[in-house]
Amino acid sequence: VLYTGNGTSASDTQAISGVGFSPDWVWIKNRTDAAFHILNDRVRGAGKNLFSNSTAEENTGGSTGDLFTSFDSDGFTVNYEYGGGTNNSTNQNSKAYVAWNWLAGGSAVSNSDGSVTSSVSANTKAKFSIVNFQGTGSVITVGHGLSSTPDFIILKSRDISSSQWGTYHSSLGATKSTYLNSTNAPAT
């Protein structure tokens, strides 16, 4: 969906509708300014922002914590919480935004298919899932709630401020990865 921001102060919210469903993952980008990509998902909860163009850890407060306030029946609600020259809000007055929306499986369920328990919202028909799990510092397997092996995986540590956005794609093979926040070629 495309929308225009209308906020001028920290208490200004805007409900964005027209999605056609209650999204489980929303990726928002300011189209007017050079600004961060802002990602929210239902598994982690509204207001827990990740920035796909940055290695920053999950942001849940301060200058960017209230950017995304809720998942709604036909869209989502954003807030004006201006963060300066990097995020430029999700509801800044007269700014143009795009929001990509995905439907997973609603609220997360516990999944113990891997060596660690994960929280999963999966849409098996669309072959898409959102997974949250705790790393151990060792090799682990993680249940994803899908009926077949994923072809594409995006992985981000939520609590390490210098963590890259590791990506896997089946066309590259199991020994290569790329970084979503980088222009580097695939590496082994």
Image (cartoon, grey):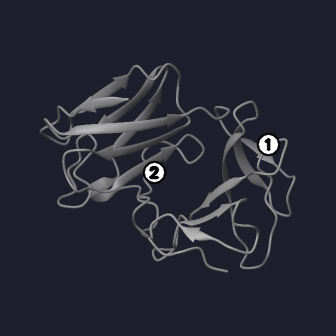
Q: Which residue is mark 1?
A: 146
Q: Mark 1, mark 2: which one is toward the viewer?
A: 1
Q: Is residue 27 left or right of residue 150?
A: left
The image shows residue 135 at horizontal and vertical percentages of 70, 69
Q: Identify the mark nearer the N-term, 1 or 2.
A: 2
- Give the label on residue 103, or none: none
Instruction: Give the Cα separation between the discs numbered 1 and 2.
Output: 24 Å
Few, some or many residues within 10 Å of mark 1 (<14, 14–19, 20+)? some
Against 139, is 21 above or below?
above
Count of marks, rendered view: 2
Relative to 37, residue 95 above or below: above
The circle on residue 48 is 2
Whole-percent x and y of residue 12?
20, 34
- SS of the residue under disc 1: loop
Q: Residue at x 45, y 51 (%)?
A: 48
| Image quarter hosting the N terminus | top left
Near-viewer residue (167 or 45): 167
Residue placed at 77% from the left, 79% from the top?
138
| Pick the front one: 165 or 56 | 165
Mark 2 residue crowding within 10 angstroms, few (<14) / some (14–19) / many (20+): many
- Relative to 66, 186 lies left or right: right
SS for dot 2: loop
Q: Amino acid at mark 1?
A: Leu
Image x and y of residue 34, in percent? 22, 56
Q: Quadrant of residue 56?
A: bottom left
At x 47%, y 46%, the residue is 40
- What amino acid is found at the position of numbered circle 2 in the picture? Lys
Q: Quadrant of residue 122?
A: top right
Q: Quadrant of the C terminus?
A: bottom right
